[in-house]
Image (spheres, rainbow, N blue to C red):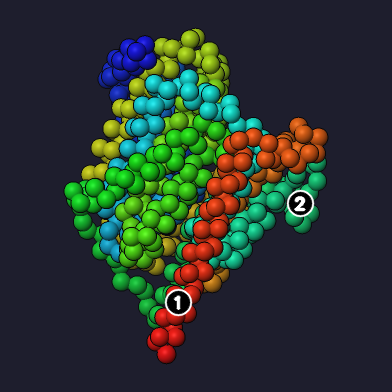
Amino acid sequence: MDQLTLLMEGFAGVLTPMNLTLLVIGAVLGTAVGVLPGLGSAMAVALLLPVTFSLHPTGAFIMFASIYFGGLFGDSTSGILLNTPGNSSAIATTFEGHRMAKSGRAAKALGISAIGAFTGGLIATTLVVFLSPQLVKLATLFGPAEYFALAIFAFAAISAVVAESVVRGLTALGIGLALALVGIDSASGAERFTLGSAALFDGISIVVITVGLLALGEVLHVASRIRREGGPEVPVEAEGSPFPSRREFRSALPAFLRGTSFGLPFGAIPVGGSEVPTFLAYGTEKKLAQRRNDPDFGTRGSIQGVAAPEAAGNATAGTAMGALLALGLPTSATAAMMLAAFQQYGMQPGPLLFERSGDLVWPLLASLFVGLVILLIINLPFAAVWAKLLLIPRQYLYAGITVVAMLGVYAIASSMMDLWLLLAVGVAGFVMRRYSIPLAPVLIAAILGPLAETQLRRALAVSEGDPSILVGSNITVVLYTVMGLAIAVSLVQHLRHRQRARGAEKAAV
């Protein structure tokens, strides 16, 4: 039990007045930046990196850890209240969370989100402390072919399983892949879909795509409804307790654990962050809701639909920290910013970090536990206060969202082209809403499309063009088999649902 002894020494280093103060400041700043549309946990670390230049390394990394998780808590807050997630990791939480907010349960959605984030982060951090050797082994099992199979699995799961219509799901997937292909091809250096514009050589930022589809698209959609209905919508009720009742907690607990089980393994492998596990967790809850005939899922908003993705996202963040420390492997954009912070202090994360810088690593891991408790204390009681944002008249609220979204996107690269792209993607998001084309496949394809292409090329380069390498390991065979079964089951369910709908129409006639 050497890890337990070292962890206790880490707690002794964290529980000092100075380090606790830094932990609280980091939690508040991370949450505040995460709440802003267009920003997020990665941006929070990037923006606040200069603040720590004058700090001792231990204090700096304790502050980084609280900023890291604080940003994740804030990402979901803006998604639930404004349908504008601060980061792509909160997209899946936004779907049911915003529905709960619109039905007058904003405080409850924020409370469930906070508890889910705490649960996933706590379990993941505990496993990182005690199972880091096994974490290393898990990450080393994945090569280019396995990464490609994982990306294809995610595409199929989102397009054919989560979407109501397979055709519409695949259409959305194609739109996302088209957006992902814009820019300079990293392997050949060829221009792709840039229309000769140098501003598009770097591609379309995922922040532009996310904010455009979810924020600006929602603004245009709400504006069209107000115009069509002849006046502004009545503000939804934002009162209520953020604390779940005993019955609600019992129903949410299995979702917390299911979401955590999705997130744990994905943090150790570089698949683009927590998008895959959060969407898979959301898809699982959707299927379970259909089985139990849950009338709230997809309409008023389901507690399970918030609990599972939020737990998955923070579980991924916890094991991503373990992969960063044990392997020096950044598995998400936020972890990459943390790697830059380590390098700023002349340290390289990896297997030797625990031996050479144990006096830094163990206080950092201990700070994750303390930071999660502080974030729960900060977010859970004040959920009803955040929910008051919904009482702002819609025309002012959505005008403010548009301004903040534009400023957030412009702040990233100071590019006017990004603003024009944001407007174009927002119009596309509005059209997709009008014709019931799902947004999730667009986002997952835009995020994982470049990864899938890169890993496919690497796998074929290793095999000298032999495609059999794509199914040459047990992991790839299992992934493709599960994917095929999931698609088959989904198609059967869609056909049955269509037949029942036709039967109901004939009976009505």
Task: Give the amino acid at mark 2.
Answer: Arg
Image-based side of 326 in relation to 173, left or right: left
Q: Is residue 15 above or below residue 301?
A: above
Instruction: Give the Cα separation between the discs numbered 1 and 2.
Output: 43 Å
Q: Quadrant of residue 65?
A: top left
Q: Secondary structure at mark 2?
A: strand
Which circle marks residue 370 in the picture? none
Type of the residue with mark 1: Ala
Q: Secondary structure at mark 1?
A: helix
Can I make out residue 10 in this image? Answer: no
Task: Give the percent coordinates (x, y) of residue 436.
Answer: 51, 69
Q: Is residue 15 left or right of residue 262?
A: left
Q: Classify 10 Å Cα crowding around label 2: few (below 14), some (14-19), many (20 and above).
A: some
Residue 501 disc label: 1
Q: Which circle's residue, 1 or 2, is located before the other in the chain?
A: 2
Q: Position of residue 292 (x, y in %)?
A: 33, 60
x 34%, y 52%: residue:
304
When the figure is inspected, residue 167 is found, relative to residue 117, above or below; the finding is: below
State which quadrant residue 186 falls in: top right
Q: Looking at this view, is 55 or 86 the one in front?
A: 86
Q: Residue at x 53, y 36 (%)?
A: 332
Give the residue pinned by disc 2: 192
Seen as rendered, the residue at the extreme left is: 246
Q: Residue at x 38, y 55 (%)?
A: 288
Picture coordinates of residue 75 (x, y %)? 42, 46
Does residue 58 sit above or below 419 in this rendering? above
Is 339 on the left-hand or right-hand side of 201? left
